[in-house]
Amino acid sequence: VVPQTENDEECLRRLLDASASLWNELTYERRQNYFGDGDVWDTSEYRGQYNGVVGSATVQQVTRKNSEAWRSFFALKEKGENANPPSYWGNEEDGREL
C-alpha cells in the first residue's frame, strides 16, 4: 500500500500504530499469564477495546497472528527446542510512541 497524500500516510500510520499497540497488549497479557498462572488464550477483553479503533476484521487478524505466534512458541517448547515467547512490536526507529 502506497499512500497517495500526506493525509493518507497519516491515516495508515495511525492504523499501523494501533495494530501494533493491540499486538503489544495481547503479548503483554499473554506473557504475564504465561509466567504467572493465567490462561494465555483469553483475549476477549481486547476485541471490544480495539473494534472502534481499527475495526473488527483487523482486531481478528492481529489476534489470530498473535495466537499463531504463541502456538508456535508452545510447539517448539514441546519439542524441547530453545524458544522464547513472542516479542513486542515497536516504532523506536521512527521515534514514534505507540
Image (cartoon, rainbow, N blue to C red):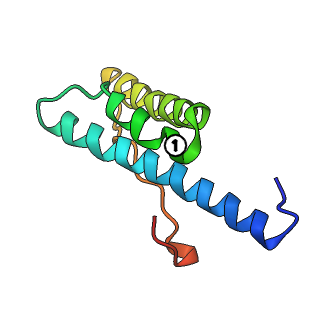
- The quarter of the displayed image where residue 39 is located: top left
On screen, 19 above or below 36? below
Q: Looking at this view, is 82 or 8 the one in front?
A: 8
Residue at 45% x, 45% y is 23
Q: Where is residue 25 in the image (x, y as percent from the top left)?
A: 36, 47
Q: In this view, does 35 lie to the left or right of 95?
A: left
Disc 1 crowd rating (10 Å Cα; few below 14, some 14-19, many 20+) is few
* Left or right of residue 69, residue 36 in this image: left
Q: In this view, does 27 lie to the left or right of 9?
A: left
Name of the residue lying farthest toward the front: 52
- Coordinates of residue 36 in the picture (x, y in percent): 12, 36
* Residue pictured at 43% horizontal, 33% vertical: 47
Residue on which disc 1 sits: 52
Q: Residue at x 16, y 39 (%)?
A: 35
Where residue 73 sits, quadrant-wise, is top left
Image vertical order of residue 96 relative to residue 43, above or below:
below
Percent position of residue 41, x then y: 32, 24
**What's under tag 1, amino acid-wise?**
Gly
Q: Which of 40 and 60 is in front in this view?
A: 60
Left or right: 86, with 94 as reference point: left
Q: Residue furthest right?
A: 4
Q: What SS does tag 1 mark?
A: helix
Q: Which of 89 and 71 is in front in this view?
A: 89
